[in-house]
Image (cartoon, rainbow, N blue to C red):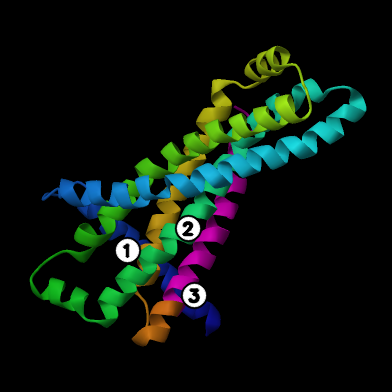
Amino acid sequence: MGMLKRLEELGRFFSFLGELLRVAFVPPFRWGRYMAEIEHLGIHSIAIILLSGGAIGMIFALQLVGILQIFNAEIGTGAVTAVAMAREMAPVITTLMLIAKNGSAMAAELGTMKVTEQIDAMESMSVNVVQYLVLPKVVASLLVFPTLTLLANLIGAIGSYGIAVYLHGIEPGGYLDYMFDMLIPTDVISGLLKALVMGFITATVCCYCGLNAAQGAKGVGEGANKAVVVSSVSILVADYILATVMMGF
């Protein structure tokens, strides 16, 4: 029965995705809601991305310098950090931070609207809930996740530069030359594509969990918790699949 319930829920999720795609290009287009979600998901998340991206870049460089010094190759600290951030670290860390900050909030918001019967009231007025509530969050996520990933790349590279040059005295000209020689556009583009897919997964999973939360405060909490867990695991699985696919590029 447990397996049947999981398959049934998976079917409901794909039905939810089908409805989302159906209404994606159907008017009315509520641009005000899109802008509000972009502000909420993106602009209000800049600080946490700056802190996490900078910290990851600094920590990564700190560890790398010690290892590469053994081989007298510490000049490559920037190159390794930049490639690792662009391909893997920036999209994954950015997505996990946004799941913790915004994914749980999406699920809790929609779950609360469901248990307080606001969604039932909207449906009684012939408002398509998926189009009105879910679509703006998904569109905003598709725009915000790659943009903040690019910001995490930049601040991570700056943090790495500070550790390598000012703390360990690595020659800055050679550091930057080697970094830009090794970092190619494909590295950055692959990370942004991952962030795009992860943004879609995060928004759809969290909104689905919110809309299907059980009744009561406990149900809303469990829905938000489920949204964070499922979306976090899903983006890690997606990261592995995408990394495998992109290995040839």
Q: Give the magenta-colored segment's residue range.
A: 222-249
Whether 234 is drawn above or below 51: the answer is below
Q: Picture coordinates of residue 106 (x, y %)?
A: 36, 63
Q: Nearer the viewer, residue 56 or 222?
A: 56
Question: How many residues crowd around disc 2 within 10 Å: few (fewer than 14), some, or many (20 or more)?
Answer: many
229 on left or right of 164: left
Secondary structure state at the residue bearing disc 3? helix
Residue beneath label 1, please? 16
Image point (49%, 39%), residue name: 149
Residue 6, which numbered label? 3
Are the two marked residues, 2 and 3, in contact with CB atoms closer than 8 angstroms? Answer: no
For label 2, the SS is: helix
In this view, the mark in front (2 or 1): 2
Q: Is residue 244 among what the camera can see?
A: no
Q: Which residue is mark 2?
A: 99
The residue type indicated by label 1 comes to Phe
Cα–Cα span, label 3 and label 1: 15 Å
Prevailing secondary structure class for the magenta stretch in the rendered image: helix
Residue 246 is a magenta residue: yes
**Left or right of 110 in this view: 96:** right
Q: Is residue 156 above or below residue 199?
A: above
